Amino acid sequence: MSSSLTIESTLKLNTGAKLPILGFGVWASPQNLTVKSCLEALKLGYQHIDTAQGYDNEAEVGEAVKQSGKARKDIYVTSKIWEAGADVESTYERCSGSVKKVVGDGGYLDLMLIHNAAVGAEPRKRMWLAMEKLHEEGKFKSIGVSNYGIGHIEDMKSYAKVWPPAVNQLELHPWLQQREVVEYCHKNGIVVEAYCPLVRNQKADDPTLNDIAKKHGKTTAQVLVRYCVDKGWSPLPKSDNPGRIAQNADVFDFQLGKEDMEKLDAMPQETPLVLAVDNESTA
């Protein structure tokens, strides 16, 4: 990755759309703080907000988009569907609900994802077919998946008109690199997004990480965000602390060297909290 990247840099999706290289996550962000945190992020130059039906704060993200004073085209919004309806039509209605909550009846979402592959093969199919319909109608500019293994993405070929998905969002950081599925995505033109890039702050005391942070005069969180950027992933750090929201975006004035990346790549690998594995298909 080039050191000339900025917070305005983008990754090109297979739909031709451009995904901002840095996103702002609102997982577990309480409703009373979501608007404030999103407005802070947008003020600091973040251009992408990542929400989900399961986060129960889509409406608050929409409110922040409205209050920001920015043009809709200048804010990239992602949501995710957690659960399929009984059929494609009712699933379509669930997906449409996200558009209404975030941007109102006449609006669109830039990206819609299936939240988790572990719901099973049939629900995954219903969700994808419903999302394809909304994609055709221009309500979803791009559609993708989250927590999908290789088997899940391959399985889509049997029914998907839109394949490959534009994005696969995975938990990614030095201790969870999910190398096989990431390599598969890169080979197939699927952009990889990294959620929990800060490892839920569980590795802040790691000596190697701290050494690298000291060397660059950065925090451990900034090193972890930059690690994702240098891997070609789009990180989605989240925080409701204004200072940390700013800090997590301040990662474009340095670059990790080859030796830094090798040390971080060599971290022992852990098991993801969300397993992209089910009985029908293996990751």
Image (cartoon, rainbow, N blue to C red):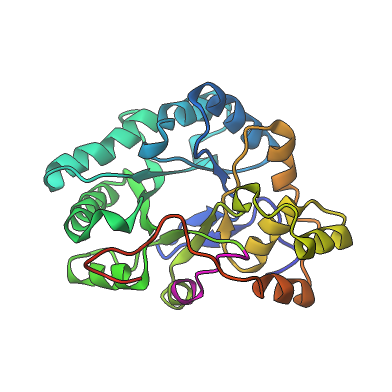
Q: Nearer the viewer, residue 65 or 154?
A: 154
Is residue 103 visible in this depiction of the protein? no
Q: Where residue 171 sits in the image (x, y, percent)?
A: 50, 58
103 is higher (above) or lower (below) than 2: above
Q: Where residue 193 sits in the image (x, y, percent)?
A: 51, 58
Is residue 23 visible in this depiction of the protein? yes
Residue located farthest toward the top when viewing the structure as drawn: 32
* Residue 182 drawn in magenta: yes
Q: Where residue 202 sits in the image (x, y, percent)?
A: 64, 51
Q: Name the residue: 32% across, 30% down.
A: 100
Quadrant in the rendering for residue 190: bottom left
Q: Nearer the viewer, residue 275 or 35?
A: 275
Which span is picked out in magenta? 174-183
Quadrant in the rendering for residue 62: top left
Q: Horizontal placement of 208 versus 245: left or right? A: right
The C terminus: image quadrant: bottom left
The N terminus: image quadrant: bottom right
* Residue 85 drawn in magenta: no
25 is higher (above) or lower (below) than 199: above
273 is higher (above) or lower (below) than 89: below
Q: Name the residue: 36% across, 35% down.
A: 107
Q: Where residue 241 sits in the image (x, y, percent)?
A: 68, 32
5 is higher (above) or lower (below) than 282: above
Tag count in the figure? 0
Q: Name the residue: 24% across, 67% down.
A: 156
